Image (cartoon, rainbow, N blue to C red):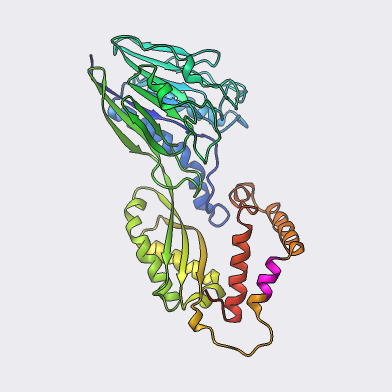
Amino acid sequence: MTAFSFIHAADLHLGSPLSGLATRDADLARRLASAGRQAFEDLVSQAIERSVAFVVVAGDVYDGDWADTTIGLFFARQVARLDRAGIPTILVRGNHDAESVITRSITLPDSVHVFPAARAGTLRLDALRVAIHGRSFQGRAVEENLSLTYPAAVPGWFNLGVLHTSCTGHAAHETYAPCSVADLAARGYEYWALGHIHEYAELSRDPWIVFPGNLQGRSVRECGEKGAVVVDVADGRVTGVSRLPLDRARFERIAVDLAAAADPRGAVEAVEAALRPLAAVAARRLLLVRVHLVGTTRAHDALAADRETLTAEIQAAAHRLHEEIWLERLKIETCRPRAAVEPSGAAIDPAALLAELDRDPDFRTRAKAALAEIGGRIPVTAAAEADFDAEFDALCAEAEALVLGRLGGRHC
């Protein structure tokens, strides 16, 4: 049998906005908005450069129905590049681009094969002796174990299954087309190209069952390397699976312990040291980092009292390392050493008052209403990232730290 390679991608989510610094830097917002498309352009370029036999996309090409034809034309233009290079594109529809979800269409090249939703189908590539099996989603919520409807392996051929599924489940993703590793292995295929879970995962190597993760992270909830995988095949067997980073913008989180920092300058130096290993990542893409300041530190009061200056200094430190390292958000979760608290003789204990206020149901109701009003005034993309309900307690803690920092004290 002929040796060949193919690219397995999933969850392109074309048309989905990235959440980050959109409200703070207009140029960066523009670059973030185009990151997903550029990542797919790079995938196509890699496929052509590597002369792969075909490209598989395991669902969610689109993030939902199109507002207009722009995103459909973009995808059509890219797969036309593959078509001109003699590279077929094979895909299934997932929960975000199910048959009932996408109401518009653009004619695609004949080399693009979309598996139907009514039943599982098989595409045979005779020259390679490859049989590709797949089935699309009819609607957004598919509860059926679709893998059980896939046909048996074609004897003597390399068999590849394409499926959008939560498989055995994932805390960050809804359960769709659930199945087990045993269900997939029972079909007798050599490789399963899965989609839906936005993290790289190898569920099995005999047979190979792989989630490539999404092509481009969309917020700090999707940290780390994103892209596709390149699969090498020889004599009807998988001989190699390697990750192919394609993300144009990457999200990361770091926690910096400021126990040794005596002042804001020391805090900034500690953050800069923690960011330094990430400079190599930023050399090839935008890097957006959420920084958590933690630990018991004498610098706490000064940090909490002037958050704006601290944020600017940390951003400047990041840019000293590389111009493409951006502070996505700064979270101050430090506290003041107990030994540093000196009795003031004051009759009122601000910390006790704030703690009592935080327990007051009426205050919490009014505070949540105020946050909801704020949420209604900020841009939609920023509002989607700002989960006020989930972060309410953290926001209250930050407000408490700011007040006590300016008054002169919070301790652990």
Q: Nearer the viewer, residue 64 or 390?
A: 390
Q: Determine which quarter of the picture holds residue 67.
A: top right
Residue 81 appears in view: no
Estimate the x, y position of residue 326 in percent, counting from the top left.
45, 57
Coordinates of residue 353 in the picture (x, y in percent): 68, 75
Residue 309 coordinates in the image, percent (x, y): 52, 71
Q: Is residue 317 visible?
A: yes
State the residue at coordinates (41%, 27%): 181
Q: Main secondary structure of the magenta part?
A: helix
Q: Is residue 338 left or right of residue 205?
A: right
Q: Which residue does the image show at 31% across and 26% down from the upper left?
A: 206
Magenta residues (range): 353-359
Q: Is residue 385 left or right of residue 163?
A: right
In the image, is residue 82 part of the stretch drawn in magenta? no
Q: Which residue is found at the position 38% from the left and 30% from the top? A: 210
The quarter of the picture where residue 53 lies is top left
Say whether residue 358 is magenta.
Answer: yes
- Identify the residue at horizontal 53%, vertical 30% (top origin): 62
